[in-house]
Image: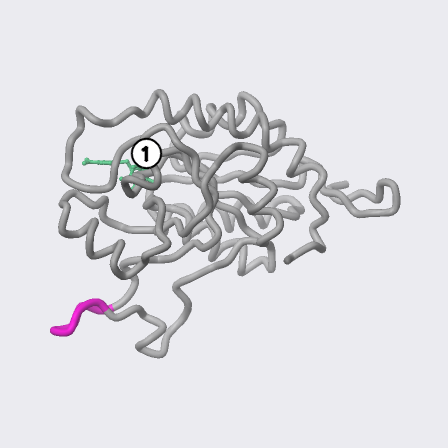
Amino acid sequence: MVVQAQEGRLITSAAGILVATAVPAERDAVARTFPGRVIAAGVGPAAAAAATAKALSTAPCTLVISAGIAGGFLPDAPVGSLVVADEITAADLGAETPDGFVPVTDLGFGTVTHRPPAALVRECAAATGARTGAVLTVSTVTGTASRATALRTRHPGALAEAMEGFGVAEAAAAHHLPVLEIRAVSNPVGPRDRAAWRIGDALTALTGAFGKLTPVLESWNPHDTH
Ligand SMILES: O=C(O)c1cccc(C(=O)CC[C@H]2O[C@@H](n3cnc4c(=O)[nH]cnc43)[C@H](O)[C@@H]2O)c1
């Protein structure tokens, strides 16, 4: 059973939570401290959506979490910090025009943003010391200062960019499930500098975060969507 009544309120158990990471190193970092179901769904929004949707079709679930490493927008999300998304936005889903980028929603199609439950976002941030803000999903890792500036101009509340959150969120939405995104910053968003990546530190931060998140997630009432 994934939802139980305890002291008159509904709670979810870790067994009913699906965490979708991109690669096995992220999956193992989460699984070190999180007792629920953790998958390595692949890199990029399409792989993440397909693998998450497949996993959701095989077992009951109350909450879906996209987790992993990310690029952080400086100075707000430095390397080693944690970000909990209050908004999961597909930042490059749209059309380039002479007047700039136009999101697909302005073209009359689909959606570009999913919003996690606000109270759960606040509780997760408080438990882990994470910052809260938009996490952008991109299909191309930003590698220049000009693109970083363009993204931040279009999304002033953005703290991080990664490649899977929107895909995981689309799969969750198709199953009418809430979604969270939690990221540990491994590199700054900006000019490409492989020497600046701190993937090991970010994975360690992810492990620590899920150790603190587990009791929060397990005591969350899935009917509290505020
Ligand atoms: O080759 C590069 O310059 C480069 C820079 C940063 C990350 C990559 C990756 O291939 C990692 C993609 C993987 O990790 C997440 N991630 C981590 N940092 C970022 C980022 O700055 N922008 C977007 N995604 C990032 C992502 O979710 C993927 O799972 C290569």
Q: Between residue 178 and residue 60, name the one nearer to us.
A: 178
- Callout 1 crowding tier (Cα within 10 Å): few <14, some 14–19, many ≥20: some
Span highlighted in magenta in the image: 95-101
- Furthest-bottom residue in view? 108
Cβ at disc 1 under 8 Å from ligand 1: no
Residue that appears at 42% across and 52% down:
167
Principal secondary structure, stretch drawn in magenta: strand
Q: Regarding mark 1 in the picture, which secondary structure is present there?
A: loop
Against 210, is 72 above or below? below
Q: Residue 224 falls in which quadrant of the image?
A: bottom right
Inspect the image, locate mark 1, and give the three-letter code of the amino acid beneath it: Pro
Residue that appears at 24% across and 41% down:
189
The percent coordinates of residue 124 (x first, y second) are: 57, 39
Q: Is residue 96 magenta?
A: yes
Label 1: which residue? Answer: 78
The percent coordinates of residue 23 (x first, y second) are: 38, 32
